[in-house]
Image (spheres, grey):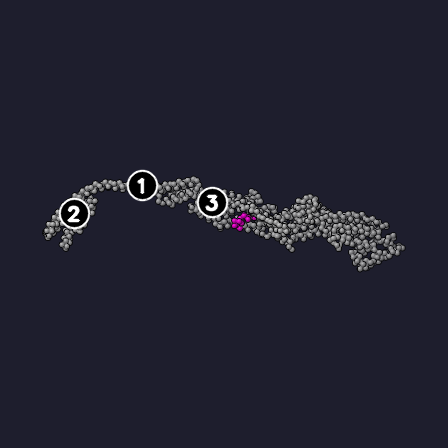
Amino acid sequence: MDSKIHKRRATIDNGETGEDLVLATLIGNGDDLGPLVRHAFEMGRPEPLVQQLKHLMKKKEVEIEDLCKTHYEEFIRAVDELRGVLVDAEELKSDLSSDNFRLQEVGSALLLKLEELLESYSIKKSVTEAIKMSRICIQVLELCVKCNKHLSQGQFYLALKAVDLVEKNYLQNFPVNKIKIVIEKAIPMIKAHIEKKVTSHFNEWLVHIRSSAKDIGQTAIGHASSARQRDEEMRERQRKAEEMSMAGMDFVYQLDVDEVAEESVLKFDLTPLHRSYHIHTCLGLQEQFRDYYYKNRLLQLTSDLQIPSSQPFIESHQTYLAQIAGYFIVEDRVLRTSGGLLSVEQVETMWETTVAKVVLILDAQFVQMGTATHLLLVKDYITLLGATLRQYGYEVSPILEVLDKSRDKYHDLLLEDCRQEIENIICNDSCDQMIVKKESDYDNNVLAFHLETSDIMPAFPYIAPFSSMVPDCCFIVRSFIKGCVDYLSYGLNSNFYDIVRKYLDNLLIDVLNEVVLNKVHSPALGESQVMQLAANISYLERACNFFLQYAAQLCGIPVRSVDRPRAGLTAKAILKTSRDEAYLALLTLVNSKLEEFMALTENINWTMEEIVQDRNDYMTEVVFYLETLLSKGQQILPLDALYKVGSGALEHISSSIVAAFLSDSVKRFNANAVMLINNDLKMLEKFADERFQSTGLSEVYRDGSFQGCLVEARQLINLLSSSQPENFMNPVIRQKNYNALDHKKVSIICDKFKDSADSIFGSLSNRNTKISSRKKSMDMLKKRLKDFN
């Protein structure tokens, strides 16, 4: 073994190559040389292997020789075996050469096929990649075609989606560089085109929505007006039901479903706005679009807030306010549906700007308005504007405060309008009793204002105790109350009954009462006209209860609340005072007329020698005048007023009779004149007693009478006719029989009393003892009166 190793090392040392060593090792180990041979032929270099084998064979031969020398027999056998191996090797070589030839034949054909196959594989790969690239190009081009189609049809969002697909999914890995460059250049242009078109459409929408804002606002305000009208109708029916219920009548109020028809929803198109906002969001221009929208809408609002100078505000206020309402209804819808296009703060800023501007404009316009009708018209629309925008969450109190600030001006204008109408009615009133020809007129002019004197329907034609000025003035007062309530309704204050009552008092006191009193004191009026005015004032005073109830009804408060103490009108007391003043004016006229009649007493012969049984003509005229006066008063005046007029006239007549005796024109009178005056007085007393009974005053004033109003004249006549006139100085008798007489007046009258020889108060030369006794009594009375004075 060691010798083999030694030989191998010697061989290596003798310059044997590594391949020879490997081959020797393989042969020495008995390994299969087939792979090595196959490899040599595959490499096309079998000769080196043959040379190596030959070289190895030579070396082996040397080794064999050595071995043979050592092991000759064995060597011989080995040689023999080697010869056999050699033969086998030759056979193997021949086989290998044959196999190699066949292999070359077969391999050449296969190699050609292989080269063809590899080329096919390469072509296939190129085709596959080309197909893939083509498909990508087709998809991109299809998206481009769709994009162009969408652009032409105005479907900008779909076009933008197509561009985004190309940009995100295809463009980065696009295989065709030239097409990629073209598309990359086209995408910004397409986006710019889309932005331009969308902005153009949005601008058109801005113009459209501004022009539509007026219609939107008018529609919304119309809905608010309809809702208000339904509420008023419902309250009116409820009030009637309550009144009928209080009256003990059954009344069922049923709210029909048809009465509460829902208002149609306001319709206006925000699609262009939402589309523009969404596309700008997709373009990454969301903030830019928000700012653009806000600035443009602010510009529109600024323009809308300018009132037109070409027409008066009263003609343009509805359009102006409807435009504002429509603007903010749109902004509310945008705020709720646009997904962040507007912020609450921006809307509040626009609303605060609008409120400040509108308040300034309304203040200025209200100052310029000169009629209550215009103020009310604008006020109604402002409250409807407030009710409309309050539904959308806007704070409208500052605008409604303008109405409160103009409240006094409105009522001053309304008061002045009513003053003109009332002055026209009262000045043109004939002061004749109103004739009502039919029941409908009675309902409208009498029952409507609670002016009826009886619950029974009268026969027609009906002669009312008042003139036509009473219902005419009541119509004006009622319209004034309605005007007050209309202005105060739907404002900041929900409970405004006390305010209405204050303004109603102003109308009744400062206007109606003043105008009526001016008419009463007019020098052109006669007694019947002043009497009619006094009666009219009484009925106007009675109508005050209706005015209060009507005001309470319109203000929506229980009618029973106006019946409480201290809840009435101050004007009622003022009208009572004015009524009394009218009675005094009437009495002044009556007394003036009576003085004309009583002035005829100067024509009486106060020293007549013969007794005349007839009455004086003046007293006939006085009775006729009083008859006419009291008949008229009985028709139109209340009994207390009739009593005042009658008693005042009779008292004045009584005073006039006494004044006739005191007149400087009467230097002396005799008993015959006293008897004549007594006849006149009796006639007057009879008339007074009859009228006191026929007018029904006796049932009211049981302790009084018209005849008692003549007591001064009667006591004077009784004194002058008495046989014992000195009894006047007896306090007991004077208190009983002459308590109405003034001793000073009696003294003056007694000084004028001079009887003739044939009279019942004869001279000292008269032989009649009785007459002489009376004269002495009169002289005694005169003396005692002088001492008393």
Q: Is residue 552 left or right of residue 738?
A: left
Q: Residue at x 76, y 48 (%)?
A: 627
Q: CA distance from mark 3 to mark 1?
A: 50 Å
Please tell me which residue is depicted at 79% across the width and 56% down the height of the picture: 741
Q: Which residue is mark 3?
A: 273
The front one of 463 and 718 is 463
Q: Amino acid at mark 2?
A: Gln
Q: Nearer the viewer, mark 2 or mark 3?
A: 2
Determine contact: label 2, label 3, CB under 8 Å.
no
For label 2, the residue is 52
CB of mark 1 within 8 Å of CB of mark 2?
Answer: no
Question: In the structure shown, which secondary structural element does the residue marked by tag 3 occupy?
Answer: helix
> Which amino acid type corresponds to the residue marked 3 in the rendered image?
Leu
Is residue 281 found left or right of 726 in the rendered image?
left
Quadrant holding the C terminus: bottom right
Residue 411: image location, x then y, percent: 61, 49
693 or 214, which lies in front?
693
Horizontal relation, residue 460 to residue 618: left or right: left
Is 431 colored magenta in this rendering?
no
Secondary structure, magenta segment, majority class: helix
Q: Mark 3 touching mark 1, by CB under 8 A?
A: no
Q: Earlier in the sequence, mark 2 or mark 3?
A: 2
Q: Which residues are magenta?
A: 383-395
Q: Amino acid at mark 1?
A: Val
Give the camera-side residue of 447 and 364: 447
